[in-house]
Image (spheres, rainbow, N blue to C red):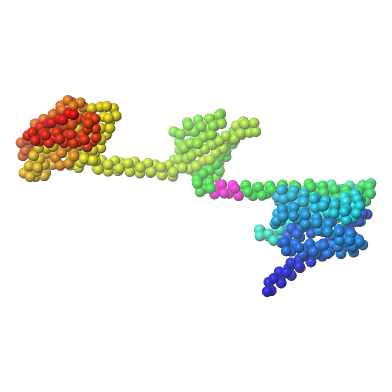
Amino acid sequence: MLRPSVQTLRNIFWPVIIGLAYYALAFASFHLSRGETGIATVWPASGLFVAALLLANRQRQFWIIVAVMVSSTVGNIADRIPPMVALGFSCSNVAEAILVTWLVSHGGKAQFSLDDADAVKRFAVAAVLGALWSACLAMAILGYWNSRFFISWFTTVALGILIVTPVIMLFASAVTSKHRPLSLTDISRSVAYFALVGAVTGGVFLQSRFPLLFLPPALVLMVVYRLGTLGAAVSVTLITAIGSVATTTGFGPIHLIDASYDTQVLFLQFYILIILASTVPLAVVLAESKRMFSRIKRGIRLIEMAERTAHVGHWHLNLVTGELFWSDEVYKIHGRDQSYKPELDTAIDNYHPDDRAWIIQLVENAVNEGQPFDTDARIVRSDGEIRHVNTRGEVETDTVGGIIGLYGVFQDVTRRVEILRELDQERQRAQDEAERAKLLAETDQLTGIGNRRKSMAVIQAAIDEARAHNQSLSVAILDVDHFKRINDRLGHATGDEVLKQITNQCSMSVREKDFVGRLGGEEFVIVLPGASPEKSLAICERVRQAIEKFKWAPLPIANVTVSIGLASYSVQNGSLEELLNEADKALYIAKDSGRNQLISLVA
């Protein structure tokens, strides 16, 4: 139960402090810088109020509004303003702060930053609108129109918000920042600059003889370059405070103006506004430039890391000056150190002699015709090692489209080339292995000719070809007569030799484009594409006679004969099965006719 009460005390403590500070600033403004109309030159209390609302959470904002309302009303009454009017003026001050806070934060969490140009513009517009709204409410409460009162209220409130709020926000950000805290050197340097601004401004405004109002703005510009937005905000605040007090007490070059006091105060406000308008935008631009420089620097580091990881460098050729720039990774790829000064001719000389011609052609095409290029080539490093590189380039043009340079990237792809070469070798090896495996799967191990699987594929392909082109086709089945008797009487070794010799005789007796395959056992098939029935018959007869007349010595065999069944392709036997059945029928007729026969069944 203790935690909620502590939180409540915190929510009340800071609003009370802010209320007291508001009263103190209002009191100081009334008594140190008020004019004949009773309105102060600058109203810093409004700036404090807006900053407090921007920094507080919603619960604490309520108590801050209550505290400021009370302190403002008490202060107005203490300054002999009628209670109801004092309450109305306090409502005007509260309304302006609420409006500015809402506009800056878009109705949500405050997004205030003097380093962001959009945020600064939004804050400036909000301050002007808030001051205008407050002045209108004050005039309504006053009950009659008074232009001097309206202008004084508007300008003092607007300047108070524009000057004081940024200072408080910047210091609050510095205190709560999680980034690198300010060092003693930074603090000392800042104090020295602000002391210089205060001293120069005091010297200018504590005399009324010379018009030296140009000195503080010039000094502020220097401080802005050194300290950025904080320098601008604090310097303008110092000039405002010193100038307001000095002018109110009768000092300063403002009194060189031959005009009424209110006109002099209005000129001082305009002077402060000009300083504010000329320094804050500069500070914003410098802050944006610093952020951009940091982003560029970070981007360069990331690019360098990526280049080292991917072995990629970048280059730029200035065609106007002839200067060639290499990044660190390009030097590394070439095996060079930074002492090597690359030029276009020497850079091309780094390429392999066989590759220089087309590199020169690519560069010339890019320079003359604006063509981008992307090519692989070889370079010879300083140590003699050959590296494979990929270089890409595009043209750089001026505002009128003229080509003024080339830029691109340079990548070491040696490992990639080696991997591709290895992959090609592995792919070729795999293809060779596949071919060998296929050959083994389709080859009869004994005779070395196509086996049954291969034979069926060849016959089907021949049928498809004959059907597609209306060509002749014949298929013969050959069977060795009494082969079982040879095996039984002389052994399987002799039988194997017989099959090999029959294979040789068949291969020598057919045409080059014909196919001889072994169906299994002592059965062979002969495929005769494009052969007419008569031509097929002559070829098969040549095969039969060659086997019959073959001298088998030194084998203990007198002679070996074969029976052949021949079938020719037609529409009636257009399938593989039908064609083989036809040849098989002819073979059985040959065997039944006494063997050593060639029988052809022509449909």
Q: Is residue 107 left or right of residue 91?
A: left
Image point (15%, 39%), residue name: 523
* Viewer can see residue 561: no
State the image coordinates of residue 206 (x, y, percent, origin top left): 89, 54
The reply to whether residue 314 is in sight is yes
Q: Is 367 located above or below residue 274 in the figure?
A: above
Q: On the picture, is 39 further left or further right than 285?
A: right
User: What residue sits 35% from the left and 42% below the top?
Assistant: 427
Measured from the top left, where is residue 358 in percent x and y? 48, 31
Nearer to me, 195 or 88? 88
Q: Is residue 383 left or right of residue 270?
A: left
Point 77% across, 54% down: residue: 100
The percent position of residue 106, horizontal first and vertical second, equals: 72, 53
Toward which corner of the image does residue 447 lie, by quadrant? Answer: top left
Q: Nearer the viewer, residue 579 or 253?
A: 579
Eyeballing the image, is 110 above or below 349?
below
Towards the viewer: 288 or 504:
504
The reply to whether the magenta stretch includes residue 110 is no
- Tell me what residue is drawn at x 56 percent, y 31 percent: 370
Q: Quadrant of the N terminus?
A: bottom right
Instruction: Give residue 43's quadrant in the image.
Output: bottom right
In the current view of this chain or complex, which residue is farthest to the bottom? 1
- Say which quadrant the C terminus sits in: top left
Main secondary structure found in the magenta portion = helix
Magenta range is 298-305
Residue 369, percent across and down?
Answer: 55, 29
